[in-house]
Image (cartoon, rainbow, N blue to C red):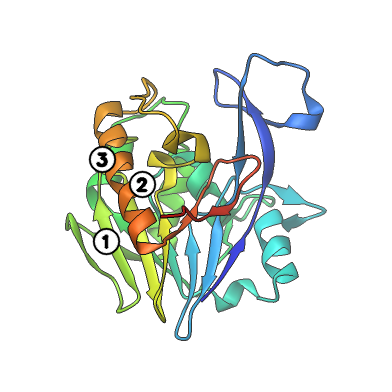
Amino acid sequence: MEIYPLKDGDFSVDKNKNFTYLEDTENDKNLKMGVQPFLIETAGNLILLDAGLGWVENGIPKIHNNMIKAGFQPKDVKLAMLSHLHKDHIDGLVNREKNDWTLNFPNAEVYLQKREYDFALSKEGSLSFDLDVLKFIVENANIVWMDSDKGSITSEIDFEVTGGHTPYHQVFWIKEDGETAFYGADNLPQMGYLNYQIAFKTDYDGKKAMEERIIWKQRAQEEQWKILLYHDIENEIISLGK
């Protein structure tokens, strides 16, 4: 398999969940993070893992530009896997530059946890969600509703609902030819999360997320996973030595 980070950039995020490029802000007190969806090419599929912020540059969605630089066209994406429904993970599925919104990946099947969707709808007014975008996706994309706690999507892709960051947050394993890519999304968004056993208060269930990371770290070492880091500024893909 081939893995392509599709980096939106490095950002400063204020208490109102506003994202600003790091180079454009002088506020050192804000949260700092990268935003980078991943594109995975296997023999049978082109898979998108989450979708970023949905920013547009020079009239073109940034995620499209990144994908084209990697040698692909948006129409080629067959499967889009959503770990959870916070706006910085789903807004890149929609082009909102014009009055008539359009899907950025019209040919993709979008895999979405039904229970996570119901939770998102209950959070009207939350700054973490963009419910207008979410509803547009559900009404217009080729949605594949998921309601199991774990299983296989294809022979290459396994998933598990872990909770943690959100109630029905899910993670993915993509496997091909003896290689395993692991996407822990916001339960394992940065390399630093592996170095310290911390239950983060910003998570829905920080203790659960912390416990999962301990298990994943051991498995990643034993099975030589490639770990994909969505919010790391310096690292995109890491492997842990035994």
Mark 1 belongs to which amino acid? Trp
Q: Is residue 239 above or below residue 169?
A: below
Cα–Cα gap, marks 3 and 1: 17 Å
Cα–Cα gap, marks 3 and 2: 17 Å
Q: Which disc, if any, is residue 192? A: none
Left or right side of 99 for 57: right
Q: Is residue 204 above or below residue 228?
A: above
Determine the secondary structure under disc 2. helix
- Tell me the residue that label 1 is attached to: 145
The mark that comes first in sequence, 3 or 1, is 1
- Tell me the residue that label 3 is attached to: 163
Q: Position of residue 90 (x, y in %)?
A: 49, 49
Mark 1, other Cα within 10 Å: few <14 / some 14–19 / many ≥20:
some
Taking depth in this image into account, of 144 and 99 the one nearest to the observer is: 144
Hey, which quadrant is residue 166 in on the image? top left
Left or right side of 98 for 143: left
Q: Position of residue 184 (x, y in %)?
A: 39, 49
Left or right side of 216 for 108: right
Determine the secondary structure under disc 3. loop
Residue reaching furthest to the left? 148
Judge depth for marks 3 and 1 and give the one in front: 3
Residue found 44% across the figure and 39% down from its top? 86
User: Label 2 near label 1: C-beta < 8 Å?
Assistant: no
Hey, which quadrant is residue 195 in on the image? top left
